[in-house]
Image (cartoon, rainbow, N blue to C red):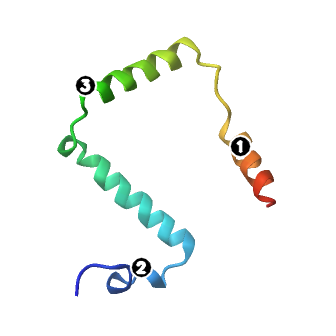
Amino acid sequence: MGVSVKTLGIDRLNVEERLALVEEIWASICADAKVFPLTEAQRAELDRRVADDDAFPDDVVPWDEVKASVRSRLGR
């Protein structure tokens, strides 16, 4: 049998535990980022975004406002 949610017992975790596991898995993938080199177009886009952020550092929406807006739209 192959690797699955059931064979690993992940289906027995609650939602918070599964989300924490997803974060850990994603972090482990990011740690191996050199396995996935960026294309020139991707690098250029990242450089453009960093430059835009540097030029307009106050042009952001705080996370609490984003979260409240989403919850409002979802009726929570």
* Foreground of the two, 34 or 20: 34
Residue located at (76% from left, 48% from top): 68
* Residue 10: mark: 2
Image quarter of residue 35: top left
Report x, y in % for residue 5. Answer: 38, 79
Label 2–label 1 contact, CB within 8 A: no
Q: Answer with mark 2 or mark 1, whichever residue precedes in sequence.
A: 2
Farthest residue in the left direction? 35
Camera-near label (2 vs 3) is 3
Report x, y in % for residue 45. Answer: 38, 24
- The residues bearing labels 2 and 1 have C-alpha atoms spaced at a distance of 30 Å
Q: Answer with mark 3 or mark 1, whichever residue precedes in sequence.
A: 3
- The residues bearing labels 2 and 3 have C-alpha atoms spaced at a distance of 38 Å
Question: Does residue 68 sit above or below 15 in this rendering?
Answer: above
- Neighbours of disc 2 within 10 Å: few (<14), some (14-19), many (20+): some
Residue located at (54% from left, 11% from top): 55
Local SS, label 2: helix
User: In the rendered structure, which amino acid carries the disc numbered 3?
Assistant: Glu
Report x, y in % for residue 31. Answer: 27, 47
User: In the rendered structure, which amino acid carries the disc numbered 2?
Assistant: Ile
Image quarter of residue 57: top right
- The residues bearing labels 3 and 1 have C-alpha atoms spaced at a distance of 34 Å
Question: Does residue 6 sit above or below 32 in this rendering?
Answer: below
Q: Quadrant of the N terminus?
A: bottom left
Q: Which residue is mark 3?
A: 40
Report x, y in % for residue 21. Answer: 42, 66
